[in-house]
Image (cartoon, rainbow, N blue to C red):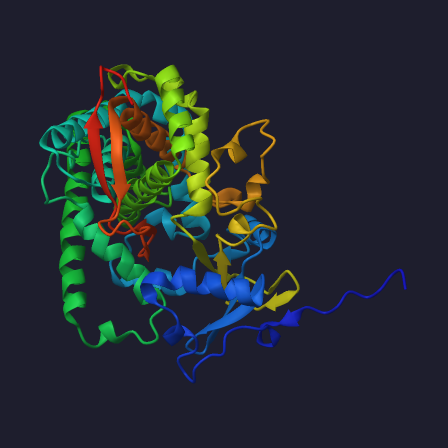
Amino acid sequence: MQNAIAAAPRPMHELPGPRPWPLAGNLPQMRPLRIHQDVEAWSRQYGPLFKISFGRTPVLVVASHELVHAVLRDRPDGFRRPSITAHVSDEMGGLPGVFLAEGAAWRDQRRMVMAALAPHAVKAYFPSLAAVAQRLQRRWQQATRAGSTIDLAEELKRYSVDIIAGLAFGTEVNTIDGGEDVIQRHMDVVLPAVARRSIALFPYWRYVKLPQDRHLDSCLLALRQAVDELIAAARARLAAQPARRLRPANLLEAMICAADEGGSGVDDQAVAGNVTTMLLAGEDTTSNTLAWMLYLLQQNPAAMQKAREEVVRVAPDPTAFSIEQMDGLDYLDACAQEAMRLKPVAPFIPLEALRDTVVGDVQVPKGGLIWCVMRHDSVSEAHVPAAADFRPERWLAGSPQAINKHVSMPFGAGVRTCPGRYLALLEIKLASAMLLSSFEIESIATASRQPPEELMGFTMSPIGLQMRLKAHHAGRPV
């Protein structure tokens, strides 16, 4: 028959998947710090659509990039972040802001976040970004003279936090030179706890506090105090200079003004939540991507040489970097894209259906949970030739090696695409250009010289990467 009747959608319970344990589902089969790898392994075994269970709750795993793209584009109307994550966040004080906001609240907050992170706003702030990169350069020069080993992930976190703090809060937070008492110490505890509690089989912390829960509570208190201090400083600036209310100079001031006016949908809790969200964006996501990229470049000398040659040609002097030079670093941009394909810091995105819907040929009821695997097709030979290789040329315009850009979606898709993507790529190019123009990289490796393990906290980070640098020879990079 030419007009064959389409098959009815399959219910989730008919899908293949790993056999669940009684009551606990598949949770005992998943390692909390390697959960992304466990689900990726199952996707290779069971295909692009299969089911797992968190306790008695069924979860549809979606590993096809076409289906993931369609699901992400159906936000915010068709899908949201899981409500359990929002509940866990609320218990902790409702910290993650626009990251977990939904519906009208998301739209109200999104407008201001988008304005603060738009390319023109970031470009206007570029001199301050360059100053942070020079601060990092001086710190690494000291380490080089001392023959010290550099904790790569830790150093890059400081760099990223310093950049986002100035852009979003209008205040200098110098964690590069500021010693150990820095705000991300608390973020490193709070954010993984949100992820961990979101998939917990039983909310034991509501009834008994283990040592890790008491430590979390102290970090939450310290983080709230730090955020309150940032808000108080901004309010003081607005009180001293009332004209700033007409033209807020940064995201924090804009949100405070909106909250004070009323009717904007933004309240004091949203202000505090978005301060924390911006710190998250400034810490884990960008810094981990940059750490992975530098490691992959060090493992691929030909790509490293091409990147260095581009920097020497386009942006040779870190004391005189310009935004035009950064925008002209096409190969470095391609290196970042390739690193995000191989090592996405958000290797999965959990979502909840807001209405009865169909994903592929699977019926998903309202309230049903979806687990979008972001690293499946992007590392599959069926979609990417020599998929395991680090080949930045795939991302260059007009390259014969070019691939379907939608196979890798490190910033998401649709209207909820990450608003900080331009800033993130600019931070990555700025730091890597400074490094390649100022130093010879002796090594980027773990102490064991084994590939770094992937640790899944709130984002996926490399474990134990240490960097050793040498100074220029004869005033030029080697």
Could you say which is closer to the camera, residue 21 or residue 244? 21
Write down the quadrant of residue 207 in the picture. Answer: bottom left
Specify the quadrant that holds the C terminus.
Answer: top left
Q: From this viewpoint, which residue is outermost toward the right?
A: 1
Q: Is residue 160 visible?
A: no
Q: From this viewpoint, which residue is outermost toward the bottom?
A: 22
Left or right of residue 224, residue 361 in this image = right
Q: Position of residue 334 (x, y in %)?
A: 46, 32
Instruction: Residue at 35%, 65% (x, y): give it.
Output: 198
Q: Position of residue 121 (x, y in %)?
A: 36, 25
In the displayed structure, would residue 113 be above or below residue 349?
above
Left or right of residue 312, residue 9 in this image = right
Left or right of residue 80, residue 404 in this image = right
In the displayed structure, would residue 22 be above or below residue 309?
below
In the displayed structure, would residue 141 be above or below residue 404?
above
Specify the quadrant that holds the N terminus.
Answer: bottom right
Q: How many marks?
A: 0
Could you say which is closer to the camera, residue 181 or residue 443? 443
